Amino acid sequence: MSSGGDFCICSSVLCFIILKTILVDAAGDSFILEVSPGPIVGQLGSSVTLPCWTSPPINTEALEICWYLPEQFYFPVLLYHDGKIQETQEERYRNRSSLTLRSVQSNGLKDGDVSLRLENLTIGDAGVFHCYVSGDKSYDSQAVTLNITAVGSPLVLFSKPVSDDDTQLNVSCRSSGWFPKPSVLWKSDRTNLSTGGTSHTRATDGTFSVQSWTLISSSDVQQVFCHLSLSSGEERKGGIDIQAIRSSSGSPSEGPWKVLFILTLVILSLLGLGFIFYKYREKLPGKKTDKKKTDEETNTQMTPLVVCNDEVIKKLRKHADVITLDPKTAHPDLKITADLRAVRDSGHYPPKESGVFPYELCVCGDQTFNSGQHYWEVELKVKNVSTKDYWLIGLMKQGNSCSADKSALTPSNGFWFLCSDGPNGVHTSTDTSVTLSFSPKPQRLGVMLDYDKGQLSFYDITEYKHLLTMNTKFSGSVVPLFNPGVGDHSPLRILDLTEPAEASDPTVPLLDSQNTA
Ligand SMILES: *[C@@H]1O[C@H](CO)[C@@H](O)[C@H](O)[C@H]1NC(C)=O
Ligand SMILES: *[C@@H]1O[C@H](CO)[C@@H](O)[C@H](O)[C@H]1NC(C)=O
Ligand SMILES: *[C@@H]1O[C@H](CO)[C@@H](O)[C@H](O)[C@H]1NC(C)=O
Ligand SMILES: *[C@@H]1O[C@H](CO)[C@@H](O)[C@H](O)[C@H]1NC(C)=O
Ligand SMILES: *[C@@H]1O[C@H](CO)[C@@H](O)[C@H](O)[C@H]1NC(C)=O
Ligand SMILES: *[C@@H]1O[C@H](CO)[C@@H](O)[C@H](O)[C@H]1NC(C)=O
């Protein structure tokens, strides 16, 4: 607030009632105020117009106009008198509020349009605003309700079997950055599904993260869709193709049952081995991460599971593309092999304070995509060297450049990726990110882009797991994006899936520990 004499004349609202009775029926300039019925809905971070106008239209240029919150006459949102906007604004509305036109046809103050424009909306802006105009002979006040909405990040879907046989799947859907709490609807290709459970958590900026799950019978359902919607009508949808991440085993005509049975046995025994190994590892000293506590709040522990199998991976590989790195796009602190397939940090990169992933340390693929399905695999482990802890793999809009600022790396800015940040777990590049932890760490990651469907799916190829699917919308050309992080012993290597030996047996390590960097 500025000093002394310039205090808000909105206080005259206090004598509103008395004056109204005196001035009632005053000839000439008498007017009432009108506002649009029902709440005005504004999107978090954007701007909104709260319409308010005199009836009949009168010239309000010389009148006093005040927008204020209930009970806050002295700290107005906006005060106009003596022909200009006064600076006695409440601090949090300074530079965010102005008088505006309620439509393009409006002549503004000349015709009694005193509509308020508010910019950079925050959750705290939701509520009632009073519009007040005072002339010599008449004045009036009206209330306008402002609702704030925020549509959250693209939905991330993943599934896990409920029991050993994967007849029942638990499909989860996550998204953050919503306001108010969205409602959840699960659907299959044919019917509504019942929601198993939904939980909400509140972020520091006031928005909600949502996690919902449903149980499905994997033989009955082809596709599962998660819909999140607000009462204002805004919504986001995401789907997951159950048959694509499972196998085509649903149709018996496609192959003899025996093969299927053996295949299942193989998978089950692999699962068994994996499980024993996993248990054993748990017993090793020093295995527990100290971040355990915080992880549990936001993470889903992805214990060993087999959802996809050989067949699924074969199907994915039908869409395999040859991906090479484009050295022109590489950060100077990266080393790229001559075959343009492997990348790692050069060792010159200045160490970051811990817990800060080096997002700018990236390189793009040389291939661009603007339609269709594309698949590639990335090796995150070299024989007898530990699996990478740090990596970032995904897509970026062509022409973007990687910034060190995580908050800039969102789908709306043209970044879609999964990032493994050591003990901090794995997060997605969603406007407010979704964090997961995969156990064991993926040794080979499969990336499936379905451009037209707007889906980016990640698979753990060694574990036969579908990790998650991001549901988003692509526009323009996108390029593969890679970031090897800092300090790992293994490089990040794109596999050549055109070599026949590799395509036929995904369990054989594809990468010999030749010097890659
Ligand atoms: C409003 O803008 C002026 C200059 O345009 C600036 O000096 C002032 O700090 C701003 N106030 C707020 C609250 O942002
Ligand atoms: C409103 O947001 C824009 C873009 O984020 C920013 O440049 C501007 O400074 C903000 N204005 C105020 C008054 O906060
Ligand atoms: C399904 O998974 C969610 C986590 O994604 C979990 O909270 C829920 O308890 C699971 N439900 C069942 C029946 O396993
Ligand atoms: C599915 O649920 C929605 C919302 O509850 C409802 O409007 C719709 O009629 C339902 N559809 C079917 C096929 O049950
Ligand atoms: C505005 O918000 C109120 C309370 O939060 C809610 O009941 C109402 O449905 C909302 N209206 C619109 C149009 O979003
Ligand atoms: C990797 O294994 C080979 C034998 O297979 C061994 O000679 C070599 O020392 C191992 N390297 C590391 C880094 O452990």
Image: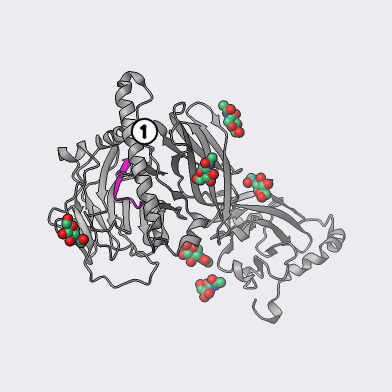
Q: Position of residue 24 (x, y in %)?
A: 84, 56
Q: How many marks overall?
A: 1
Query: Relative to 114, is 203 on the left or the right?
Result: left
Q: Secondary structure at mark 1?
A: helix
Task: Give the quarter the ligand 6 occupies.
Answer: bottom left
Q: Is residue 390 above or below residue 497?
A: below
Q: Residue at x 42, y 37 (%)?
A: 240
Q: Quadrant of residue 467?
A: top left
Residue 247 is a magenta residue: no
Q: Position of residue 402 (x, y in %)?
A: 32, 60
- From the viewer's perspective, is residue 247 above or below residue 47? above
Q: Nearer the viewer, residue 485 or 273?
A: 273
Check the picture and name the quadrant holding the N terminus: bottom right
Mark 1: few/some/many CA within 10 Å (<14, 14-19, 20+): some
Q: Is residue 46 above or below residue 222?
A: below
Residue occupying image coordinates x 29% and y 56%: 387
Classify residue 130 by image quadrant.
Answer: bottom right
Q: Write the residue at 66% across / 70% down.
A: 82
Is 183 left, or right, of 31 in this rendering? left
Residue 74, position as x, y percentages in the image: 72, 71
The residue labelled by disc 1 is 244
Relative placement, left or right, of 325 versus 97 is left
Residue 447 within the magenta-colored segment of the rendering: yes
The residue range painted magenta reads: 440-451
Residue 58, x across and y down, in percent: 69, 55
- Residue type at numbered disc 1: Ala
Residue at (23% x, 67% y) in the render: 333
Residue 273 seen in the current view: yes
